[in-house]
Image: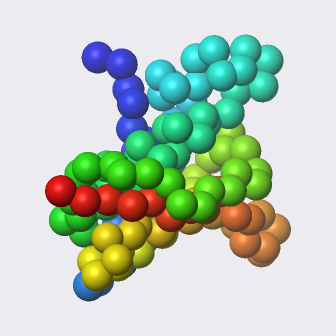
Amino acid sequence: MDKRKPTLIKLDVSDNEANLTLKVDADILDFRGHFTHFPLLPGVSQIDWALFYAVEHLNTPALFKGMEVIKFQEPILPDAEVTLSLSWDPAKEKLAFTYSSQKNGNRIVHSSGKMKLGE
């Protein structure tokens, strides 16, 4: 079976928020062909993972209704360790997510966005 998800290192969940520490393993299928000489994690994979973990750990609706805001600022490279922060607003049916990491004591934001979910 081809690997599609990262290794979950740590999980903290409270109310409508979750923080996941993920190891973005180099053998994840999504790195193949994206790009041959400079592999990076596709944006669509980042969105997919945010939705997957929100449904799994925050019990959000699974139906994706669209993106409202999305920014890809720094690539996520093979074998990176990143934090995925999720925040669910049930009243507005909006999921906010941020992928970040630490480098030399500084927080690097890789991507962030908001998506509309529903039934």
Above or below for 118 versus 64? below
Q: Tell me the colour scheme of the image.
A: rainbow
Q: Which of the 4 quarters of the picture holds residue 35?
A: top right
Residue at image point 39% right, 69% down = 94
Horizontal side, residue 49 vs residue 107: left or right: left
Q: Nearer the viewer, residue 117 or 32?
A: 117
Left or right: where 117 falls relative to 33: left
Q: Residue at x 27, y 77 (%)?
A: 90
- How far from the left and from the top, in percent, is residue 74? 76, 51
Count of marks, rendered view: 0
Seen from the viewer's position, the closer of residues 28 and 30 is 30
**Quarter that holds the C terminus:** bottom left
Name the residue rendered at 28%, 81% in the picture. Answer: 91
Image position of 50 with respect to 39: above or below: below
Of 15 and 12, the residue lying toward us: 15
Query: Residue at the spot x=58%, y=53% of the render?
Result: 81
| Residue 84 percent coordinates (x, y) | 49, 62
Q: Is residue 56 visible?
A: no
Q: Quadrant of the N terminus?
A: top left
Judge left or right: residue 108 versus residue 98: right
Q: Position of residue 16 (x, y in %)?
A: 30, 80
Q: Is residue 108 left or right of residue 43?
A: right
Is 68 drawn above or below residue 49 in the view shown?
below
Which corner quadrant of the image does residue 42 belong to? top right
Whether residue 50 is visible, yes or no, is yes
Asked if 35 appears above or below 73 in the picture, the reply is: above
